[in-house]
Image (cartoon, rainbow, N blue to C red):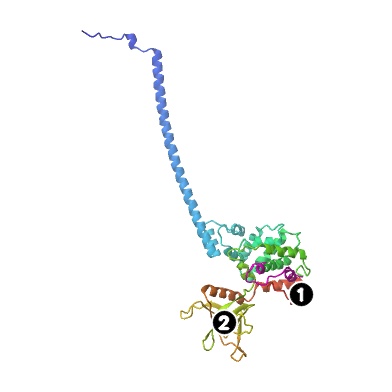
């Protein structure tokens, strides 16, 4: 049977105007959507490019930041080894300004800087260093602070150098700053503040240094400060307050252990112990008990002996050094003179006092540590001028008394 074929009518084949309009609209919207999609794709590409560029910029910023950190670290390490070289290096790389104010602020901030190197730089006598020192001290606010607390804060910001001239200059400017911050305080004279500051520091050293057996009393502290206020005595209540404050709280001394830094700075260090001494003429060796005190080196047969065998005045023309001779005993050092025989004396076999005949005194310590400690203490005692001498002169100036006998703190 044949299949019937249905042919659509013309009406059915034709679209209505409404349908044509709808179709055109759909096509237009489709085309518009395509363009919008292409535009979005372009925007995405542009955003990707921007992000990539931003990443590159961030990478460069990170690289620059890391390089800056490296240069800063190198400059800081150089400063800790040699302050002048470190500052020059940082300035060369535009990491530190050249003005005294900028350097002072950098030192005052002191991030990972050696307090000892800060002190070494501030202690230099060149005009620019002194200017930095003044700006550095001016960054300390001592307003309303007790002098003891001001000293405690001040000495915590750097390590005070050991040379008398440097200490004198630093403490002079400190006294000026303290007076500037406290014009109406109990202490109204710069020289009084200067002398009293040293007295406080020496008191601290005596009270907190284990090697000082006889600790000073309040009465001793008051006595040693008589007449320092332009010839007048300071109130005993004020000095008692200072004494109790120092006794209660030890100063935190940078780059030193157990407060030893202040002891080395403000006193000719006293030391005693066994050393082996070489003889002069016959090169004999004897174990002797040595005592270092007030620029003199004494020696005895035993620690308990009162009978002195000999002494060596530690005059400024003498020097001390480690003996590098490979034939010498370990831990050997020597006191020597480049100008002739050392002025010393000893007792001979008959008990008579005779002059020594050494141009070199060779001594052997029990360890390298002991050797280095002896050398360090002797070097300080060989200095022609000590802080104590400077302080004595200032005391005499403000008290108006010549030949003043200052009581010893220990």
Give the distance between the C-alpha atoms of the residues marked 2 and 1, in whole angstroms. 42 Å
Residue occupied by mark 1: 401
Label 2: state its secondary structure.
Answer: strand
Where does the N terminus fall, quadrant-wise? top left
Toward the viewer: 214 or 163? 214
Left or right: 108 as drawn, with respect to 403: left
How many residues crowd around disc 2 within 10 Å: few (fewer than 14), some, or many (20 or more)? some
Where does the C terminus fall, quadrant-wise? bottom right
Left or right: 215 as drawn, with respect to 331: right
How many residues crowd around disc 1 within 10 Å: few (fewer than 14), some, or many (20 or more)? few
Is residue 54 positioned above or below 194 on the image? above
The x, y position of residue 402, in whole percent, is 75, 76
213 in magenta: yes
Q: Magenta part of the protein: which range?
A: 204-226
The x, y position of residue 50, in whole percent, is 45, 40
199 in magenta: no
Q: State the residue at coordinates (60%, 66%).
A: 258
Q: Are marks 2 and 1 in contact (CB under 8 Å)?
A: no
Mark sitting on residue 288? 2
Q: Residue furthest front?
A: 304
Residue 134 in view (yes/no):
no
The x, y position of residue 195, in whole percent, is 71, 68
Q: Residue furthest bottom?
A: 350
The x, y position of residue 243, in whole percent, is 71, 65
Toward the viewer: 125 or 306? 306
Label 1: state its secondary structure.
Answer: loop
Left or right: 42 as drawn, with respect to 210: left
Q: Earlier in the sequence, mark 2 or mark 1?
A: 2
Residue 233, picture quadrant: bottom right
Q: State the residue at coordinates (38%, 12%).
A: 16
């Amino acid at each position: 049977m044949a299949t019937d074929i249905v042919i659509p009518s013309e009406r059915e084949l034709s679209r209505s105007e409404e349908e044509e309009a709808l179709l055109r609209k759909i096509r237009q919207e489709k085309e518009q959507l395509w363009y919008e999609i292409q535009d979005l794709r372009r925007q995405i590409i542009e955003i990707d490019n921007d992000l990539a560029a931003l990443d590159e910029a961030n990478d460069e910023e990170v690289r620059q930041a890391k390089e800056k950190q490296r240069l800063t670290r190198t400059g800081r390490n150089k400063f800790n080894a040699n302050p002048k070289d470190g500052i020059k290096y940082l300035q060369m790389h535009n990491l530190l300004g050249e003005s005294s104010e900028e350097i002072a602020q950098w030192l005052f901030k002191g991030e990972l800087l050696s307090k000892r190197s800060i002190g070494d730089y501030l202690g230099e006598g060149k005009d620019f260093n002194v200017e930095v020192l003044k700006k550095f001290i001016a960054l300390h606010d001592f307003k309303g602070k007790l002098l003891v607390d001001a000293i405690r804060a001040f000495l915590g910001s750097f390590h005070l150098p050991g040379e008398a001239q440097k200490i004198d200059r630093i403490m002079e400017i400190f006294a000026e700053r303290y007076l500037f911050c406290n014009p109406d305080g109990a202490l109204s004279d710069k020289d009084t503040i200067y002398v009293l500051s040293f007295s406080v520091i020496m008191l601290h050293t005596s009270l907190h240094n284990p090697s000082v057996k006889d600790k000073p009393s309040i009465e001793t502290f008051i006595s040693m400060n008589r007449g320092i206020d332009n010839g007048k005595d300071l109130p005993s209540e004020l000095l008692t307050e200072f004494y109790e404050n120092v006794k209660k709280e030890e100063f935190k001394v940078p780059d030193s252990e157990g407060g030893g830094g202040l002891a080395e700075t403000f006193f000719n260090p006293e030391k005693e112990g066994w050393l082996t001494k070489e003889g002069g003429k016959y090169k004999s060796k004897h174990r002797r008990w040595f005592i270092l005190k007030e620029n003199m080196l004494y020696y005895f047969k035993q620690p308990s002996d009162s009978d002195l065998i000999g002494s060596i005045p530690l005059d400024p023309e003498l020097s001390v050094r480690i003996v590098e001779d490979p034939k010498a005993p370990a831990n050997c050092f020597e006191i020597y003179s480049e100008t002739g025989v050392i002025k010393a004396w000893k007792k001979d076999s008959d008990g008579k006092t005779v002059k020594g005949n050494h141009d070199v005194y060779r001594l052997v310590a029990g360890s390298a540590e002991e050797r280095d400690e002896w050398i360090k203490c002797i070097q300080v005692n060989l200095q022609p001028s000590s802080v104590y001498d400077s302080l004595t002169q200032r005391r005499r100036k403000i008290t108006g008394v010549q030949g003043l006998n200052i009581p010893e703190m220990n």
